[in-house]
Image (cartoon, grey):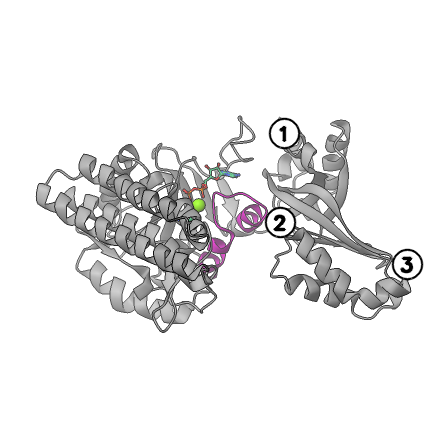
């Protein structure tokens, strides 16, 4: 993975929560930065909040709504101490230490003030929530830049509220790539020309009016991709706590292996269908500019990790079916499968449009849809916590059809999981689906629904929650065994 130092080579590196979560982790970052500086002429760093901090901020805002002042005070101290303890260990100069601690204190107070305001109001708008949760990255960016500076790097923190321009869809804001690219040219490029290392907040942006927004949980990867595309960088590296994208979630499958290479499509499907290692939205900006992405392990920087490129987009010709084709298995858990069914549905105009209109009205996202060819039923999965609201909305939308028995029922299963097998060429290789089903059949896993076709590189199956791990282990064994 080493790279000849070219006069203009640019690398964007993003460090996730665990990568900035402890003194040991940050020592690794210092070593990584040292090595990369020899090999790349321009480096931009994007950081997440320290591990656990965003969760703490979210919980604090929720507790503030119900007036839990004690929780807020404790969280303020926890926030401060978490960052102080890293400063104590990694910043030798007392003047620099004092300066950093002052900034941490200031932001922790901002946190407590915001939470107290929420507590007085008894409610938090999405905008207020973003103001609170953005504090994790606003803290970590100062911490990381300060430590790098103290280790001798020309690091300078930058809040991406000045760079990433978004709409006002708080909590899951959409970036305006053109406006963002202008800011990158105006702010980051001059810094890079001065040989500085900009250290940026992941996850956050701001509206045109300058109101802070966030890009959605796990959005630090997305930030790195956006910045990488805007520079444009030669590569984007995502540093995390595992050695790349693996054949299955290593928390579920102990012997999961690193996949050395993936193409953009495979990566997009994997992340969309549950491989948390990369945010699903992070693929698109880099695909458009054709920037290779590498996913690697902060704690084992010598591991090559996974390279994601446009290579192998053409389907490979492999004869032995699933074993050679399927690269990984993923799961989205805590779902329920909702079905709208009835013999009279054929005659009802716009059933699909009205179904998904009713779902959309509840603000629910639908990861998977299947439809019987006779159009007598439509099934789709929704997150467990949205299922009741979706059912209510559908019952209202189809009240007339239900009364007339054109639609017989609208119902939801118990908890299910979406299991997805991903691999380029899946759709063009005869027998793959059959092999997958018989492997699951032999393991006594009942498949409730199937979706194949929307993507050329993935097959998704719905199984009951209790069969989730068995299904993953069976398929993993099948593809790697
Ligand atoms: P970060 O904080 O660095 O962004 P995340 O927790 O968001 O890290 O993502 C890394 C985690 O993703 C890993 O620790 C792993 O548990 C999980 N994960 C789920 N599926 C996969 C997979 N297929 N390959 C690698 N990691 C996966
Ligand atoms: N800190 C944010 C989160 O925990 C963003 C990220 O880590 O990517 O969701
Ligand atoms: Mg992440």
| Residue 463, x across and y down, in percent | 71, 39
> Which residue is the site of mark 1?
473
Q: Is residue 166 above or below residue 316?
A: below
Q: Is residue 220 above or below residue 78?
A: below
Dot placed on the residue nearer the N-terminal end, 2 or 1:
2
> Which residue is the site of mark 3?
343
Q: Residue at x 76, y 27 (%)?
A: 442
The span shown in magenta is 266-288
Q: CA distance from mark 2 to mark 3?
A: 29 Å
Residue at the bottom extreme, as displayed = 209
> Which residue is the site of mark 2?
385
Q: Residue at x 54, y 51 (%)?
A: 268
The nearer-to-camera label among 2 and 1 is 2
Does residue 26 appear anywhere in the picture?
Answer: yes
Q: Please indicate whether residue 61 sits to the left or right of residue 251 in the image.
A: left
For label 3, the crowd category at 10 Å Cα-Cα, with few meaning under 14, some 14 to 19 and many 20 or more, is some
Q: CA distance from mark 2 to mark 1?
A: 26 Å
């Amino acid at each position: 993975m080493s790279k000849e130092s070219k006069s203009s080579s640019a690398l964007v590196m993003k460090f996730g929560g665990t990568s900035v979560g402890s003194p040991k982790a940050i020592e690794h970052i210092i070593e990584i930065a040292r090595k990369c500086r020899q090999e790349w002429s321009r480096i931009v760093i994007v950081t997440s909040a320290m591990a656990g901090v965003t969760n703490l901020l979210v919980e604090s805002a929720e507790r503030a709504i119900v007036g839990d002042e004690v929780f807020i005070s404790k969280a303020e101290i926890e926030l401060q101490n978490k960052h102080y303890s890293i400063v104590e260990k990694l910043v030798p100069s007392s003047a620099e230490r004092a300066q950093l601690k002052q900034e941490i204190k200031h932001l922790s107070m901002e946190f407590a003030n915001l939470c107290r305001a929420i507590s007085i109001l008894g409610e938090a708008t999405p905008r207020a929530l973003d103001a609170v949760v953005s504090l994790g990255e606003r803290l970590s960016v100062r911490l990381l830049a300060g430590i790098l500076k103290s280790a001798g790097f020309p690091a300078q923190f930058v809040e991406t509220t000045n760079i990433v321009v978004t709409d006002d869809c708080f909590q899951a804001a959409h970036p305006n790539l053109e406006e963002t690219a202008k800011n990158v040219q105006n702010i980051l490029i001059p810094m890079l020309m001065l040989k500085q290392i900009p250290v940026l907040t992941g996850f956050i942006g701001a509206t045109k009016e300058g109101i802070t927004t966030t890009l959605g949980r796990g959005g630090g990867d997305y930030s790195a991709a956006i910045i990488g595309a805007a520079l444009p960088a030669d590569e984007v590296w995502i540093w995390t706590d595992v050695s790349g994208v693996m054949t299955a979630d290593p928390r579920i499958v102990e012997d999961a292996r690193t996949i050395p290479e993936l193409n953009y499509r495979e990566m997009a499907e994997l992340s969309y269908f549950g491989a948390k290692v990369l945010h699903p939205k992070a693929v698109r900006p880099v695909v458009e500019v054709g920037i290779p992405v590498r996913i690697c392990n902060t704690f084992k920087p010598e591991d090559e990790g996974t390279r994601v490129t446009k290579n192998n987009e053409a389907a490979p010709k492999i004869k032995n079916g699933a074993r050679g084709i399927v690269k990984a298995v993923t799961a989205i858990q805590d779902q329920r499968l909702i079905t709208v069914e009835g013999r009279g549905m054929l005659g009802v105009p716009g059933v699909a449009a009205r179904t998904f209109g009713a779902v959309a009205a509840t603000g629910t996202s639908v990861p998977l849809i299947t439809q019987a060819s006779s159009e007598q039923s439509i099934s789709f999965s929704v997150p467990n916590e949205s299922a009741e609201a979706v059912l209510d909305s559908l019952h209202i939308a189809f009240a007339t059809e239900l009364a007339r028995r054109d639609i017989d029922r609208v119902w939801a299963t118990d908890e299910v999981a979406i299991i997805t097998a991903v691999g380029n060429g899946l759709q063009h290789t005869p027998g793959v689906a059959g092999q997958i089903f018989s492997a699951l059949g032999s393991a006594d896993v009942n498949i409730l629904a199937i979706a194949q076709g929307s993507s050329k590189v993935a097959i998704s199956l719905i199984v009951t929650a209790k069969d989730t791990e068995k299904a993953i282990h069976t398929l993993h064994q099948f593809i790697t065994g």
